[in-house]
């Protein structure tokens, strides 16, 4: 078992996310996180999929993703040197008594405070998964009121990019193209 | 499917199409519905199976302007999707089904799932509520693209008339290329009504995320050749992919050149003539015992266009344990899915087999064939279907008509030349065991999904796609009643299908499981049936009832003499027959329940008689495990 990070370039057509999500469910893939967003090209979105599995399972997912007509390219970033980031917004209970302590922790983690109220702070923190885990563990004693994480996104380092050549946007389809939902 | 098939599809383009494929004519303004019809003509479609309704009405209206598109009115949309499937399987051409939104679309679902499991190329066109109403739970709205997401190769909801021609083209392209499969195109009513300038796209289809593989890598071919060269006990497992790729000749050459026996999957029947000396017959749950033994004892499996379904492997942990494995398939996701292989090759089977053929060499091993022959000799002892004049197996009840005999005789009296289309159950397995197929696409059956009700509509579709061929629908009394309303379609279209009902008054295959595994509690499997002859006669269909083996020949002759419209034979067979051999679900492939040999059978009879005396004398009950007891009562196994 290991953490596998897959990056998929998908055509920006309605329903693509549903297709991918359905694939996870139907073939019982256990996904840790999935994040979807725009890319440098309007016609394409990029999905980052993280799963805890053996490599045969990850391989099976890659092959099944390729079976989807809208999936243009899939890469196993696990085997590539890559940069991986995740962002979290954490609302921490903080009153005038302990606010300084929380702020200090944020400084150490280079997290930003983006909202302050009498009862709490909202902290924005970016980094690799481990950093986020460590930070949340340390602020947990103060009380985490609520929290949201984006799921991981990743890019290969340097010259390693996902192939999108051979992809020509479709003339009449361009108009209908909106988002992957 | 091969490119040639795609080419034939294109050649069939109707010259009366508004825009011939050479793009000679100027653009014209057409409605979305008319564009759909134009695109169908461009794809070489000649028949559409369907059922009208509100949301698809504009397209039905447009069809009146396209007499070249013959529409077949089915009696249920499930029939339409099965007919399109049968049509596709008989020729490799794409079959087309059409239905309205909501209930029309949902009725197609079973047929779509059936086509998906068996990689059959069909395109389903459904009407949808107008774009503005989508999502509002409008009258007869269902999210059919959502429903069919996991059971289509791809599907489309067309949101603008501008994308309609491209979508239609892509749909057919995706359905017929690579690993074929069903594609659904959902078209809102307003898109069918809107008008747009229609220019049939001529540039090659470019789908960035879709490029079916062709040839294998040289390194993999070399690795496969090396395994073949070194093998002592090799066996080829030939699946549906062989005939779909048109690689039948290459398969025969490979087997002959390297002297390797061939086992067939259910859908692999027809991949090579079953009369071929290297063809062993069907493998798996109801396959030949000698075939399953050979697989278990092999030192090399060469799996071609098959997917190691659980019905052919049995217990995976003990499956062909001592063998190396080569797997060739066009779908990469099949490689290492159920069975881990030594060499996985992704490519078109014809191409890959030609690559292998160039350099394959292997020294034949007579001892391997001798072993298989021994297993076969044992199977023959247990054989229940024998010529009428030969000594019969003592287990055959005197004077009773057996389903297996019906199939064996049907094979003989049709000279093995028919396209047979089966339903699902015992009769399907008897077909597979006793009807020897010679040609590709000559057995049409629902293998992967095992869909009861498939037989009659698929046979109608097959006959309409191959009017030159004799077509028999071999159906059970249970499955026939699931889609028997399509008798009316066959009559209305004057489709000359010969229907053979293997009428055992039971959901026979389920009854068999109850006998073996549920202590003979025959819950919900006996059926009170209508008089199938009277029923068919109500439709004006000529019928015969057969109750003895001696009547089969004449009945088949009479049916074959009818060359217009359907015919029906009601074969009233023994109620409580068993399909032997049987690998219980999940058991080891060579752990088969066999029919006893005559000697074993007689010994068991004696033992049973003796045991009965003991029981009577002591009035004690013999304790036995449930399954063994169930079996013991009839077979003493
Ligand atoms: C739609 C559907 N429902 C249920 C089943 C489960 N099933 C498999 S075989 C069978 C019995 C079929 O009976 P019949 O059509 O009379 O054929 P027989 O086995 O008697 O030859 C059933 C119920 C199925 N395969 N398909
Ligand atoms: Mg029956």
Image (tube, rainbow, N blue to C red):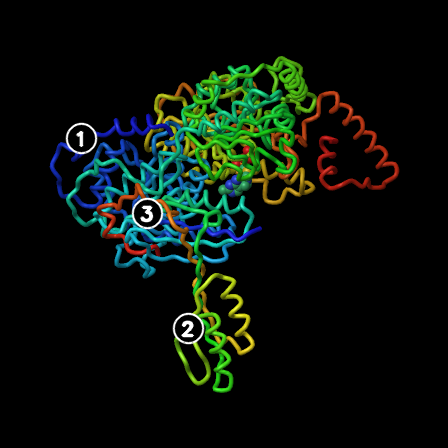
Residue B170: which quarter of the image? top left
**Is residue B614 or residue B229 the one in the foreground?**
B229
Kindly identify which chain the residue marked by label 3 belongs to: B
Q: Residue at x 38, y 45 (%)?
A: A73
Q: Is residue B18 left or right of residue B531?
A: left
- Quadrant in which the C terminus of chain B is drawn: top right
Residue B437 at x, y percent in the picture: 49, 21
SS for dot 2: strand
- The residue to which callout 3 is attached is B156
Kindly identify which chain the residue marked by label 1 belongs to: B
Residue B417 at x, y percent in the picture: 45, 18
Q: Do labels 3 and 1 touch, CB within 8 Å?
A: no
- Quadrant in which the N terminus of chain B is drawn: top left
User: Do we see residue B191 in this rendering?
Assistant: yes
- The residue to which callout 2 is attached is A112
- The residue to which callout 1 is attached is B22
**Is residue A68 or residue A159 the one in the foreground?**
A159
Q: Is residue B145 above or below residue B606?
A: below
């Amino acid at each position: 078992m290991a953490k596998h990070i897959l990056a998929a370039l998908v055509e920006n057509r309605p329903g693509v996310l549903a297709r991918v999500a359905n694939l996870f469910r139907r073939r019982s893939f256990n996904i840790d996180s999935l994040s979807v967003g725009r890319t440098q090209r309007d016609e394409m979105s990029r999905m980052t999929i993280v799963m805890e599995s053996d490599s045969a399972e990850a391989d099976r997912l890659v092959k099944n993703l390729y079976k989807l007509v809208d999936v243009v390219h899939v890469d196993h970033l696990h085997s590539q040197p890559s940069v991986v980031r995740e962002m979290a917004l954490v609302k921490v209970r903080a009153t005038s008594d302990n606010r300084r302590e929380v702020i200090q922790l944020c400084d150490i983690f280079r997290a930003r405070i983006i909202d302050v109220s009498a009862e709490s702070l909202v902290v924005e923190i970016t980094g690799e998964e481990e950093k986020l885990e460590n930070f949340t563990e340390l602020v947990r004693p103060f009380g985490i009121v609520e929290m949201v994480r984006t799921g991981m996104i990743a890019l290969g380092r340097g010259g390693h990019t996902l192939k999108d050549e051979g992809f020509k946007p479709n003339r009449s389809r361009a108009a209908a193209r909106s988002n992957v939902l | 499917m091969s490119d040639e098939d795609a080419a034939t599809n294109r050649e069939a383009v109707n010259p009366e199409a508004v825009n011939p494929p050479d793009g000679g004519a100027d653009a014209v303004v057409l409605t979305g519905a008319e564009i759909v019809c134009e695109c169908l003509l461009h794809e070489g479609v000649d028949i559409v199976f369907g059922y009208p309704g509100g949301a698809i009405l504009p397209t039905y209206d447009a069809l009146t302007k396209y007499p070249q598109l013959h529409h077949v009115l089915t009696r249920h949309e499930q029939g339409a999707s099965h007919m399109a499937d049968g049509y596709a399987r008989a020729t490799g051409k794409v079959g087309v089904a059409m239905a309205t939104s909501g209930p029309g679309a949902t009725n197609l679902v079973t047929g779509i799932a059936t086509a998906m499991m068996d990689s059959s190329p069909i395109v389903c066109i459904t009407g949808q509520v107008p774009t503005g109403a989508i999502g509002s739970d409008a009258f007869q709205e269902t999210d059919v693209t959502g429903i069919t997401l996991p059971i289509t190769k791809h599907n489309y909801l067309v949101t603008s008339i501008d994308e309609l021609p491209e979508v239609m083209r892509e749909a057919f392209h995706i359905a017929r290329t690579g690993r074929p499969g069903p594609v659904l195109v959902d078209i809102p009513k307003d898109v069918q009504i809107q008008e747009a300038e229609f220019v049939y796209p001529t540039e090659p289809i470019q789908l960035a995320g879709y490029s079916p593989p062709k040839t294998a890598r040289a390194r993999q071919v070399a690795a496969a050749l090396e395994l073949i060269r070194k093998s002592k006990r090799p066996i080829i497992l030939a699946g549906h992919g062989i005939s779909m790729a048109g690689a039948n000749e290459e398969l025969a050459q490979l087997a002959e050149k390297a002297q390797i026996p061939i086992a067939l999957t259910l859908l692999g029947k027809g991949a090579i003539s079953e009369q071929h000396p290297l063809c062993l017959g069907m493998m798996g749950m109801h396959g030949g015992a000698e075939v399953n033994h050979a697989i278990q004892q092999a030192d090399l499996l060469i799996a071609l266009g098959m997917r190691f379904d659980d019905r052919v492997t049995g217990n995976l942990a003990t499956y062909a344990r001592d063998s190396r494995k080569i797997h060739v398939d066009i779908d990469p996701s099949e490689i290492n899915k159920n069975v881990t292989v030594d060499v996985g090759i992704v490519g078109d089977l014809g191409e890959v087999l030609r690559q292998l053929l160039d350099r394959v060499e292997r020294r034949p091993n007579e001892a391997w064939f001798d072993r298989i022959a021994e297993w076969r000799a044992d199977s023959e002892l247990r054989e229940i279907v024998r010529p009428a004049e030969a000594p019969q197996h003592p287990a055959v009840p005197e004077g009773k008509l057996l389903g297996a005999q019906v199939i064996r005789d049907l094979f003989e009296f049709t000279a093995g030349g028919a396209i047979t289309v089966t339903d699902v159950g015992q009769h399907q397995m008897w077909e597979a065991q006793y009807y020897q197929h010679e040609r590709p696409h000559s057995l049409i059956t629902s293998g992967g999904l095992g869909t009861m009700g498939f037989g009659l509509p698929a046979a109608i579709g097959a006959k309409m796609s191959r009017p030159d061929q004799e077509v028999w629908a071999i159906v059970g009394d249970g499955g026939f009643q699931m889609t028997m309303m399509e008798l009316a379609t066959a009559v209305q279209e004057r489709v000359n299908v010969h229907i053979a009902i293997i009428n055992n008054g039971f959901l026979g295959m389920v009854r068999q499981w109850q006998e073996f595994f549920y202590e003979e509690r025959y819950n919900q499997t006996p059926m009170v049936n209508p008089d199938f002859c009277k029923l068919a006669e109500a439709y004006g269909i000529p019928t015969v009832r057969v109750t003895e083996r001696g009547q089969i020949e004449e009945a088949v002759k009479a049916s074959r003499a009818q060359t217009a419209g359907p015919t029906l034979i009601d074969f009233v067979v023994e109620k409580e027959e068993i399909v032997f051999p049987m690998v219980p679900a999940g058991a080891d492939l060579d752990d088969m329940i066999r029919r006893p040999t005559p000697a074993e059978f007689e010994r068991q009879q004696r033992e049973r008689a003796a045991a009965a005396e003991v029981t009577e004398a002591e009035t004690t009950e013999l304790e036995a495990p449930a399954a063994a007891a169930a079996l013991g009562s009839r077979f003493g196994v």
